[in-house]
Image (cartoon, helix red, strand yellow):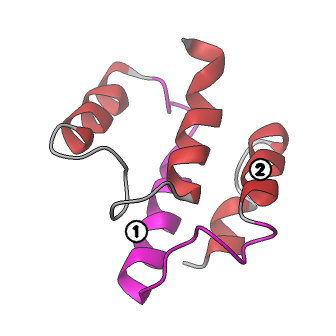
């Protein structure tokens, strides 16, 4: 799935945040195809209605234990999408 398709599934305020951060999908979406796919997958997760469920939070915690950022070694649209989706809950 592409960044644009994944971002379209986000709630409007989160989508606007992610689109602005990525300059409409031109930056911070991954350089390699593998990274782009992983960014899109995390954005899909951020768009899920149960994004703040205990199971999803545990999955996020598990993913972040060995690293600082969700994809590769830099801030990406995936990090911003997850932040935007979870911010109202914490």
For disc 1, the neighbor class at 10 Å (few under 14, some 14 to 19, many from 20) is many
The residue drawn where x is 54% and y is 78% is 1
The residue drawn where x is 34% and y is 60% is 73
The residue drawn where x is 83% and y is 38% is 13
**Kind of element beneath mark 1:** helix
For disc 2, the neighbor class at 10 Å (few under 14, some 14 to 19, many from 20) is many
Find the magenta span and give its range. Answer: 23-52
Q: Which residue is mark 1?
A: 38
Q: Quadrant of residue 9?
A: bottom right
Left or right: where does residue 67 sit relative to residue 14?
Answer: left
How many marks are shown on the rendered structure?
A: 2
Task: Point out residue 27 in the picture as x, y percentages from the top left corner.
Answer: 66, 72
- Rendered position, 16 above or below 2: above
- Rendered position, 6 above or below 20: below
Task: Point out residue 25 in the picture as x, y percentages from the top left corner.
Answer: 72, 73
Q: Which residue is mark 2?
A: 15
**Is residue 47 something that shows in the picture?**
no
Give the distance between the C-alpha atoms of the residues marked 1 and 2, in whole angstroms: 17 Å
**Of 22 and 7, which appears nearest the observer?**
22
Say the numbered circle drawn on residue 50.
none
**Is residue 3 something that shows in the picture?**
yes
- Rendered position, 84 above or below 45: above
What is the quadrant of the C terminus in the image? top right
Q: Is residue 58 one of those drawn in magenta?
A: no
Tell whether label 2 touches label 1 (CB within 8 Å). Answer: no
**Kind of element beneath mark 2:** helix
Task: Point out residue 88 in the picture as x, y percentages from the top left corner.
Answer: 66, 17
Task: Point out residue 59 in the picture as x, y percentages from the top left corner.
Answer: 26, 37
The residue drawn where x is 31% and y is 43% is 68
């Amino acid at each position: 799935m592409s960044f644009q398709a994944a971002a379209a599934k986000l709630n409007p305020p989160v989508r606007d945040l992610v689109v602005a951060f990525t300059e409409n999908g031109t930056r911070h979406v991954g350089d390699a195809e593998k990274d782009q796919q992983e960014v899109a997958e995390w954005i899909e997760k951020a768009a899920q209605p149960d994004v703040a469920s205990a199971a999803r939070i545990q999955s996020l915690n598990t993913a972040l234990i060995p690293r600082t950022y969700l994809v590769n070694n830099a801030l990406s649209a995936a990090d911003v999408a997850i932040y935007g989706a979870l911010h109202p809950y914490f």
